[in-house]
Amino acid sequence: MGRKTGAAIICILCAVFLLAVSCASSPSDAPSSRFSLVRSTETTVETGLLMGTVNYGAGFYLPSSADILDISLLRTDGTTGLVTEISHQRIRNILRFPVQFTVRYDLADIGESDRCTLIVTFYADDAVAGQGMTMLRKTDGGFADAVLTVYSV
C-alpha cells in the first residue's frame, strides 16, 4: 500500500470515527430550545490552553528529513454533529520524540455538549508519514493533558 493510499484510509477512518461519536450523543445532551440574542460590547477573548505530548508507535521511524508536525483541535457539535477545526499548531524541524506541544483555543468555541478530538499528522518530504488521534477529556479548566501516538501510514 502506497503512502497516499494509507493517508487516505487514515483520513476516512478518522471521519467515520468522528461521525460515529457525534451520532452517539443522546437527546438529553441537546441544549434548550429557548434562547435570546443579546448584544455585547465586551471584546475580551478567553483563551484555553491544551498541552500534551506526541510519541511514536511501533513501526514508525523518524526520517532524516523530518519536516512538519501538524496538530489540529477538532470540535464535534453536540446537536448537529458538524465537525470543525477550532485551533491548529504547526511544529517544524522535528529532531526527536517525544514532542511537547501547546494548542491555544477560544473557550467560547466549545459548547457544553460538544466533543473534542486532537489529530496529529507528521509530514516528511512533503508527504504524510504518520498520523494519530485521541478524544479529549473535559475538566473544569478545559481539557486534561493529551498524549498522542503517531503511527506510520
Image (cartoon, rainbow, N blue to C red):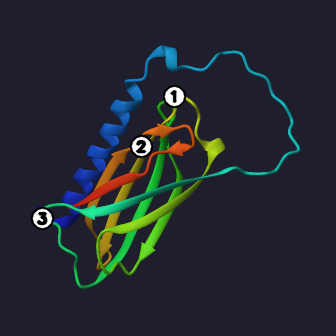
Give the residue displayed 56% in from the left and 37% down from the top: 140
Tell me the distance, in whole angstroms, between the alpha carbons under discs 2 and 1.
Answer: 19 Å
**The furthest residue to the front:** 140
122 vs 136: above or below? below
Please name the amino acid that badge 1 sits on.
Thr
* Position above or below: 134 against 30: below
Compare marks 3 and 2 and give the one earlier in the sequence: 3
Instruction: Identify the residue shown where x is 51% and y is 33%.
Output: 114
Foreground pick, 144 / 30: 144
Name the residue: 73% across, 51% down. Answer: 45
- How far is disc 3 from disc 1 in space, using C-alphas? 37 Å
Q: Secondary structure at mark 3?
A: loop
User: In the rendering, at what x and y percent does residue 130 appear?
Assistant: 25, 64
Identified by mark 3, the residue type is Gly
Q: Splitting the image into 4 quarters, where does residue 5 fall?
A: bottom left
Look at the numbered disc 1 and give the secondary structure of its residue: loop
Numbered disc total = 3
Q: Viewer-nearest of labels 2 and 1?
A: 2
Q: Quick check: 47 left or right of 76? A: right
The numbered mark at residue 80 is: 1
The quarter of the image holding the N terminus is: bottom left
User: Three-letter amino acid code at disc 2?
Assistant: Leu
Closer to us: 25 or 12: 25
Q: CA distance from mark 3 to mark 2?
A: 25 Å
Circle 3 crowding by C-alpha within 10 Å: few under 14, some 14–19, many from 20: few
Q: List x then y, in percent, for residue 138.
A: 48, 38
Few, some or many residues within 10 Å of mark 2 (<14, 14–19, 20+): some
Q: Which residue is mark 3?
A: 59
Is 122 on the left-hand or right-hand side of 58? right
Residue at 47 percent across and 51 percent down: it is 73
